[in-house]
Amino acid sequence: MDLSIVVPVYNSQNCLTELVSQIETVIEPTQKNFEIILINDFSLDQSWEKIQELCKKNDRTIGINFRKNFGQDNALMAGLSYAKGDYVVIMDDDLQHNPTYIPALLEKINSGFDVVYAHYESKKQTAWKNLGSWLNGKIAELLLKKPPEIYLSPYKILSQGIVQELIRYKGPYPYLDGMIFNVTAQIGQIFIEHRERFEGKSNYTFWKSLKVAISLTTNFSVVPVRLVSVVGFLSSLAGIVLGISFILYKLFGPDMPNAATGWTSIIVSILIIGGIHLLTLGMIGEYVARIHLNVNNKPQYIIKDIYPKSSSLD
């Protein structure tokens, strides 16, 4: 198998026929042996029925159906576990990722890269989503040493060697881009056009963007805990310095009969220190919760059906 196309699907029944058609139109002239893997992440519409219909018409298409919604990265992990291609392309189901760039991704990765991202020259998405992408990129620069010029696009191509490294992770909270930067530094990118959605509106909400940021922060680094420790130390140091200053002022400074009794400063101090304590406990709690879920073997995904039936994940 030369190439696998992995597509997580959620509520996209009206996009899938056109998506598969465009992929075939682009790749068939290259005479490469390819497969299209569609992972239905418990869609609420008729996406699974549409996937089965496409599989019946085309033996290159394979469908995987989840028992519940696990999220985009979990769906990608299932698709990567099944992908047999020497190279694996990951793309969205809404046709904002133009399949015509797949040959360019292949050409770029064959020039010596393990992973190649598709960088949008301009993005056809909401302002808050652009903000979320920018924030996650900055976090990745800090925690994963991501080069600033690399954009963490969901449209990318990976070598099979990198895929094998990624699917070794069995935890319940995968974050693919974070995992990629943990296993390789041979990363390139090409510039592409970002298209309008074929139909409907994005399923990517503010809370999903926040969840990605939390996964990126807590899954791949202990920097946040160390940062909170430094903030706590500096806060305590500032309190000691202020305490000594107030004592010296009281002993040697001028009398101030109309000075405030100190109620405001005490309340402010309590709020600041209490906030730091809660932030610290929350950060530690996030790590502990993830350890708990890993120890209790929370599944990364659960597959209900694979179509055609002759297919398997072995």
Image: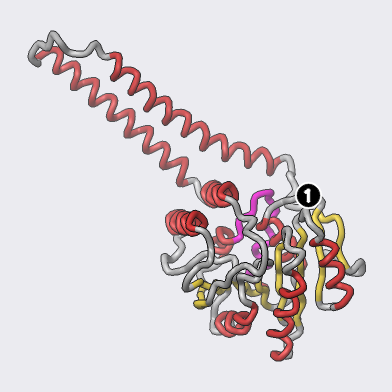
Residue depicted at 68% across the width and 84% down the height: 26
Report the residue that reaches farthest toward the front.
200
Query: In the picture provided, is 211 more to the left or to the right than 145?
Result: right
Task: Locate the N terminus and report the quarter of the image it occupies.
Answer: bottom right
Stretch in magenta: 161-176
Question: In front: 257, or 249?
Answer: 257
Q: Magenta span has 164?
A: yes
Asked whether the viewer can see residue 291, the reply is yes
Is residue 232 placed above or below 23 in the rendered structure? above
Q: In which quarter of the image is residue 84?
A: bottom right
Q: Find residue 82 and report its image quarter.
A: bottom right
> Residue at the location (58% across, 47% down)?
207
Q: How is the image coloured?
A: secondary structure
Mark 1, residue position: 68
Q: Callout 1: 10 Å neighbours few (<14), some, many (20+)? A: some
The magenta stretch spans residue 1: no
